[in-house]
Image (spheres, rainbow, N blue to C red):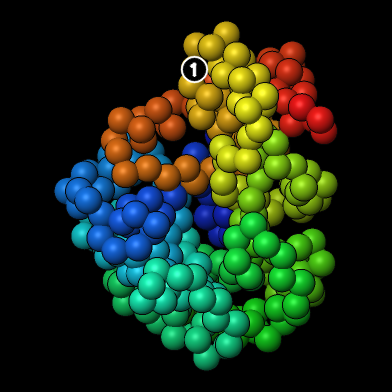
Amino acid sequence: MTHPTTHALGRFTVNRMGYGAMQLAGPGVYGPPRDPAECVAVLREAVASGVDHIDTSDFYGPEVTNQLIREALAPYPEGLVLVTKVGARRGSDASWIMTPEPAALVEQVHGNLRNLGVEALDVVNLRIGHAFSTDETSLAERFGALMDLQQQGKIRHIGLSNVTAAQIAEARAIGEVACVQNAYNLVQRTDDALIDALAADGIPYVPFFPLGGFSPLQSVALDAHAARLGVTAMQLALAWLLHRAPNVLLIPGTSSRAHLRENLAATHIALSADDMAGLDAIGAPGV
C-alpha cells in the first residue's frame, strides 16, 4: 500500500511528514536546550530534507523554540508553513496555565509574531484545556477573538487543538477550521471516527503523542512487527499513521539530527493490507 505524500493545510500544500519543535526546549519543555547549536542544525536539516510544516508555540520554553526557529531559518524559505498555538502560558515553576481569556490570546498571537519575526502567522491553533484531558466548554468567544486577528491580517488560518467533535462543529459554524491537532496513535484511537469525518471534508488531522500509552504487551507486539519489517518501533508507528488516513499530518519532534533522519525515513515505509491489519490488532481492546 502507498499513501499520498502531501495534503492541503489551509491555502497551503505541505508534505505530510512535518516537524514538531517542542523538544527543542529544555527538560520538561522549559528553559533553553542543552545543545542550542544542535537544535539549529536539526531545524536546518529538516527544511533541507523537505520538511515544510513546522509546529511550534511561544509556550515551549517559553519563547525558546520560536527564537531558535527564527535564528535557524529566517529569512524563511518560500513554502515553509509555521504553525503555532495559543491558549496557555508557562508559570515560573514550569507549570502549564490555561489562558482562555480573549485578551490573553491576542497578546500571545503578538508574542508569536514577534519571536518568529513574521508579519502574519500561517496557522494558529487554539488550544483548549490541558493535553490528555477534556474541556468541553464553549470556544466561541476564543475562536471569535482569533477571527478578529485573522481579519486584521495577523493570522492566515485558525486551527484547533485538544478539542472534541462538538467543539469542532461549534467552531466550524463560526468560521473555517484549517486543522485539528489531538492526541492519537496506534493504541489511542478515540478519534477514529473524527479523523474519517475530517478527511471527508478535506481537513487535516495532526496527531500528537504518536508513540505513547502502550501497554507492555502492546509494545512487545509492535517491536515484533518492526523487527520483521527491519524498522524501528517509532518508525513503524509513524508509518501506520501515514497509512491510516490521507489527511493525517505528522509532526514528530527531536533535538537530534540522527533521530530526525530516522523519523523522516518513516515516509518511505510501505505497509501491506496484512501489515495494517496486524498493527490495527495491537490497538484492539484487551491487547
Disc 1 packing (10 Å; few <14; some 14–19; many ≥20): some
11 lies left or right of 119: right
Viewer-proximal residue, 279 or 19? 279
Viewer-proximal residue, 188 or 53? 188
Q: Quadrant of residue 76?
A: bottom left
Tell me residue 80's x, y (percent): 39, 53
Q: Which residue is drawn at the image coordinates 63% and 82% (left, top)? A: 142
Q: Which residue does the numbered mark 1 point to in the structure image?
A: 231
Query: Disc 1 marks which amino acid?
Result: Val
Element assignment for label 1:
loop
152 lies left or right of 39: right
Q: Which residue is drawn at the image coordinates 64% and 51% (left, top)? A: 183
In the rendered image of this protein, does residue 101 appear above or below residue 224?
A: below
Viewer-proximal residue, 198 or 104? 104
Tell me residue 25's x, y (percent): 32, 57
| Res 126 seen here | yes
Q: Quadrant of residue 108?
A: bottom left
Q: Which residue is drawn at the image coordinates 35% and 63% (left, top)? A: 30
In the rendered image of this protein, does residue 228 appear above or below residue 95?
A: above
In the rendered image of this protein, does residue 42 appear above or below residue 99?
A: above
